[in-house]
Amino acid sequence: MLDDMISSDARPRLGLPIVLLMAAATGLCAGGNYFNQPLLDSIADHLNVSASAAAATVTIAQVAYALGLILLVPVGDMVDRRKLTVGLMLLAATGQAVSGFAPNFATLAVGIAVAGVFSVAAQVLIPFAASLAEPERSGQVVGTIMSGLLIGILLARSVAGVLSGLGGWSTVYKVAAVLMVVMAVALWRSLPSDSADRPKASYRATLASVGTLAATLPRLRTRSAMGGLAFAAVSTVFTTMAFLLSGEFGYSDTQIGLVGLLGVAGALMATVAGRLADRGLGQLATGGAIAILLVSWLPFVAGATHVVWFLVAIVLADLALQGVHVSNQNVIYALVPEARSRVNSVYMTTYFVGAAVGSAVGSVVWKSYGWNGVCIAGLVFSVATAMVWVHDRRLETAELRIPQSPVAVG
């Protein structure tokens, strides 16, 4: 086990400044995939495409991110994760720059795809932090970094709206490219070298072992499914809220972006969920978060005509999503510590495929059935999340009765 190889004396100290830097970097990387959500109307107008075509950029970003999770994140179990993170961030910055100077929709789509693939640097950093942290603080560290990721996503939407109001939608991507380069340099100078011993394996064998992990770890499958379904539920709203808020309530890009700041409450849930996991109460955190997600659809329905209810629902949905997500990550990182990057690849691929599916469903349903149809679709995904959680609890109970044999990985 990798954790056993790293003694308390040899383990680099993961102090608060480094944790916060990693949280900021994670937020910047993940946030880059959400810049376009409050800008869809502006993108459609300036590039002369339909609203549905503009909304497709949300799906493009998420599918690209999923490809990066499959093809790049497992490499974190093979090479120095500091070097890998910095390299990925510099490539993501290139994609943001292409988006910022895109003269047409096709170029924008390419830039968003490139930035999405390489922004998986965020998902290299999270298991890296978990391996550096003391075991009794792992949940807290993961929760803190996930809080940074959530705040980054929320700020991405809000700042995107503000910058669009000041200098046009393309300004957002130009600023992001510069910030990504600055953050990559800061990480290179601050992170400890990742010199852990690793099994010798080819890239092909490493990718193949990802499938082995998914096939042999039932709780990796259930936790991945929960994450994907919960994100699908919330993504139906994230993809279409710009159309509701701009059409029904006359909100500008800036106002739509500021609405996203209400979800900062989810950052608090991420920290709480991490601390509960350290205390052995991960199932309580998961169940509570799913209950909140189910309840959130009532104010979402009311939000079609009363914006206050929409704002309440956004807070509840972000709380729920982060509670489920952080609880899931603390469970999966404990399954096979020496394969955290590959386990994270399975989980996060499912998570963002769920987001892509939810975004696509939201766009289609909005066009045909409007806001009520979006809410029904989100509720269906939420109920499915609850059903998988019930199965996961049964698996956990069975594992406690009959301990599982260690899983061999390459």
Image (cartoon, rainbow, N blue to C red):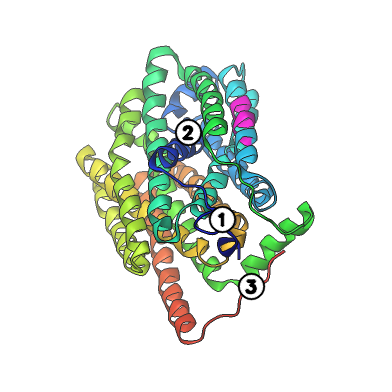
The residue that mark 1 highlights is: 344
Q: Quick one: quadrant of the N terminus?
A: bottom right
The residue that mark 3 highlights is: 407
Q: CA distance from mark 1 to mark 3?
A: 16 Å
Q: Residue at x 31, y 35 (%)?
A: 261
Which residue is nearer to you in this view: 42 or 114?
114
Q: Earlier in the sequence, mark 2 or mark 1?
A: 2
Mark in the foreground, 3 or 2: 3
Q: Is residue 18 magenta?
A: no
Q: Residue at x 78, y 55 (%)?
A: 204
Picture coordinates of residue 140, whole percent (x, y): 37, 54
Which residue is nearer to you in this view: 356 or 283?
283
Which residue type carries mark 3? Val
Picture coordinates of residue 137, whole percent (x, y): 40, 56
Q: Is residue 109 left or right of residue 286?
A: right
Picture coordinates of residue 249, whole percent (x, y): 27, 30
The residue that mark 2 highlights is: 28
Tag 1: Cα neighbours inside 10 Å, few (<14), some, or many (≥20)? many
Tag 3: Cα neighbours inside 10 Å, few (<14), some, or many (≥20)? few
Which residue is nearer to you in this view: 208 or 242?
208
Q: CA distance from mark 3 to mark 2?
A: 34 Å
Which contiguous range is marked in magenta? 88-95
Q: Quick one: quadrant of the C terminus?
A: bottom right
Q: Residue at x 49, y 53 (%)?
A: 130
Q: Classify residue 338 by image quadrant.
A: bottom right
